[in-house]
Image (cartoon, helix red, strand yellow):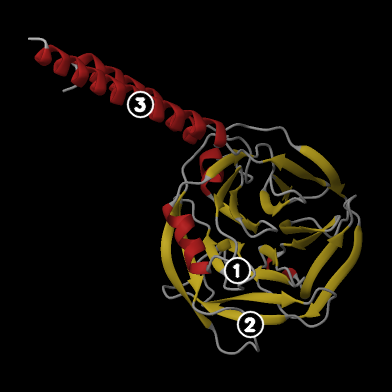
Amino acid sequence: MLKKSSVALLVVLLVIVGSRSASAADSTREPQPHWRCVVTDKRIDNASGLVTFGTGYAVINDRGSHESAIRAYLLDANCQVTKVLESPGSPSDIEDLGRTSDGALWLADIGDNDSNRADVTIWKMPPDGGTAKPYRLSYPDGPHDAEALILTDNKTPIIVTKTNTGKAGIYLAAASLTGRPREAIPLRHVGTLTVKPTGTQGGAPGGNVAIANVLVTGGAVSADGRRVALRTYTDVYEWRIRRGDSARHIAATIKNTSPQRTAVPGEHQGESLAYADHDSRMSTLSEGLDKPLQEWTLFRPPQSAPDHTARWIAASVVVALGLAALAILLIRRFRRNHA
């Protein structure tokens, strides 16, 4: 039987290991952004969606129902417009932008400030322009305002709603956006993402930081398909996924696992989000004229060193206790043999 002192030592070591793990999981930081360039084109005064590819970017402009066509602006590395992809169409409120590995751009016409849209639309824009295909989606429980799209190469969209309660709805399409667009694809409510105030400064006009902290305004998928992110006006939340994960599994990951948070303070009305050319960095862009396209290093706590240390401590404890038990057994046997 182990002595009480050995048991106490084991408890102390386990508490130390647990404390190290908790502090790593709960920590975050506020990095300083790197300004890549400034968007000076007067046509882009309400950027709400962003993707990166090659050495440039694609941006969509949020003007509610004022747009007379489907448009995406292609920018070079200096944020200068090099081309405008345009297609006939009557968008209601395009709020986010995605891109799949085939080069297609996906414009999420999902905004609904007045909550009066029975259906929403995701437009597929060919890489070189041309006619965009509209895929309609229908909520099962009435209209919702949303600004965040998660779309991987499986092309089954996930929409995350924008609410000032901090309870964002996660909606999953019942089918992928492939083939000829037909009747509206049903959306299923598959969970709720709880977003809490963080105190990070910045956000929407009006000055209510607590509300700005919880409004989900954009989504992004890394180029290697191993990470997804959502942003509020002030913070970025990131989850690890597996390449090729189904949309159902990704939605469950967002619902059930804790993300890593990176504060992105100081943006006037930050709604655009995209992974940079390296997946450890995130590009953001705010609504408004002459806004900087900023790049942030994402917070990812070191895992290998703490995990290695914890395993080493645990193994050392097991070995030490085993040796102690063996020593006690040998001493007792020795005393019996020489009694």
Q: Foreground residue, 268 or 249?
A: 249
Discs 1/2, front: 2
**Up/down of 86 relative to 239, above or below:** below
Residue 168 seen in the figure: no
**Circle 1 sits on which residue?**
110
**In this picture, is 118 found above or below 201?**
below
78 to 251, vertically: above or below: above
Name the kind of residue labelled 2 in the image.
Thr
Task: Judge left or right: residue 238 versus residue 141.
Answer: right
Dot placed on the residue nearer the N-terminal end, 1 or 2: 1
- Helix, strand or loop at disc 3? helix
Left or right for 118, reference 22: right
Residue farthest to the front, as pictured? 338
Task: Report which residue position mark 2 lands on.
Answer: 178
- For marks 1 and 3, the one nearer the N-term is 1
Where in the figure is residue 240, as x and y percent of width and height? Answer: 55, 52
At 60% from the left and 68% from the top, the residue drawn is 110
Q: Quick check: 256 above or below 314?
A: below
Camera-nearest label, 2 or 3: 3
Q: Are marks 1 and 3 in contact (CB under 8 Å)?
A: no
- For badge 3, the amino acid type reads Val
Q: Helix or strand or loop: what does disc 2 sit on?
A: loop
Decide: marks 1, 2 in contact (CB < 8 A)? Answer: no
The one nearer the camera, 325 or 20, is 325
Residue at figure coordinates x 84%, y 72% from the top left:
85
Q: Residue at x 25, y 18 (%)?
A: 327
Foreground: disc 1 or disc 3: 3
- Three-letter code, disc 1: Ile
| Residue 319's disc number | 3
Q: Quadrant of residue 73?
A: bottom right
How far is the residue under mark 2 from the one under mark 3?
57 Å
Q: Estimate the x, y position of residue 166 in percent, counting from the top left.
A: 46, 49
